[in-house]
Image (spheres, rainbow, N blue to C red):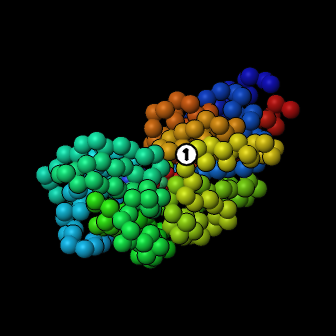
Amino acid sequence: ATPMSVMVGVGRGAKEGVLVKNAEMLEIMEKVDTVVVDKTGTLTQGRPEVTTIETFGQWKQADVLVIAAALESHSEHPFAQSVVRRAEEPIPSATDFDSITGQGIRGTVDGHDVLVGNSKLISSTLAASTSIDEVNQKAIGYQRDGATVVYVVIDGELAGMISITDPIKESTPSALKTLHELGLRVVMLTGDAEATAKSVAAELGIDEYHAGVSPEEKLSFIRKQKEQGKVVAMAGDGINDAPALAEANVGIAMGTGTGVAIESAGVTLVGGDLRGVAAAANLSRKTMRNIR
Ligand code: ADP
Ligand code: MG
């Protein structure tokens, strides 16, 4: 390759907020046919807010919130932070807490055994009196509107359901439009529930999505695509998708994401603007054409 035009390409990218790590990344980017995107923090703003709190049994909203917040204050997940922001001080302290990546967090609060997270996390711990199907049925209305439902289970009983919305980034629809125009296949992967994923995918015109995907499954999805001869770019914020980012032919980190993601990524998008993926693809095509 001719280093000069590649360097010009890299410089041009930087001006557009697309930081390309090295010449090789620009070369591979030209061959990419599949763009995999994470949902939370990549397609969405990653600044979620609690919208509703539904409680069950004798539980009151304020109590469910502080108990959930006690655990969530130990989680780095953006959803956790939204719960903490919504709870009224003082937030009790939690002990023996354990974060379950891509599912939620569990621990002890005021002598209660508490779980805060998705249906996968709570399903095995619910008391026999509560059926998970019934619980899921309650959540589906929120999920169909694209919200994430976080369950709060206290001593084996469902105490609350917190619905959280994370609006789609303003730039996302046009970013996806350009990617489709470039003939690229776009796949959304998310650890979130099926109904939530379906709603977001439909709103954005993404035909292919996979929900309830763990960080390991995100990684194996990428690996399988590569085995099938696909050249894959994966865009994510590094929260629960860092292994997948590292496995992709081109890892694309949101500049708003974690430091680890940015360090290991081939491309970083300043400000987390997904339009940079299309810009990088365009840039690589032009640069490689100049070389030939
Ligand atoms: P995405 O793939 O969309 O980025 P994640 O893999 O980060 O989503 O999370 C998957 C799901 O796990 C979330 O939709 C949420 O239901 C649940 N979850 C993960 N961490 C937490 C937490 N700290 N508190 C509550 N729920 C959580
Ligand atoms: Mg994520």
Residue 170 percent location from the top left of the image = 49, 60
Give the left or right position of residue 238, taking residue 98 as reference. right
Residue extending furthest toward the top: 3
Asked whether, in this view, residue 195 is left or right of residue 58, the answer is: right
> Toward the viewer: 279 or 248?
248
Picture quadrant of residue 28: top right
Q: In the rendered image, is residue 18 in sight?
A: no
Q: In this picture, is 144 found above or below 38? A: below
**On the image, which quarter does residue 183 sit in?**
bottom right
Residue displayed at 28% across by 41% down: 96
Q: Give percent across and percent down for residue 16.
A: 57, 41
Q: Amino acid at mark 1?
A: Pro
Q: Which residue does the image show at 57% across and 38% down from the upper left?
A: 243
Q: Is residue 235 left or right of residue 288?
A: left
Could you tell me if residue 96 is visible in this image? yes
Residue farthest to the right? 292
| Relative to 58, residue 37 above or below | above
Residue closest to the eye, 57 or 263 = 57
Decide which of 139, 18 is in the foreground and name it.
139
Label 1 CB less than 8 angstroms from ligand 1: yes
Residue at 82 percent across and 30 percent down: it is: 291
Residue beneath the point at 71% across and 59% down:
180
Residue 36 placed where, x, y %? 64, 50
Tell which residue pokes out farthest to the front in this image: 128
Q: Position of residue 216 (x, y in %)?
A: 58, 44
Instruction: Classify 10 Å Cα crowding around label 1: few (below 14), some (14-19), many (20 and above).
Output: many
**Going by the image, does 143 lie left or right of 207?**
left
Judging by the rendered image, the residue that carries numbered circle 1 is 215
Quadrant of the snapshot with the C terminus = top right
Viewport quadrant of the N terminus: top right
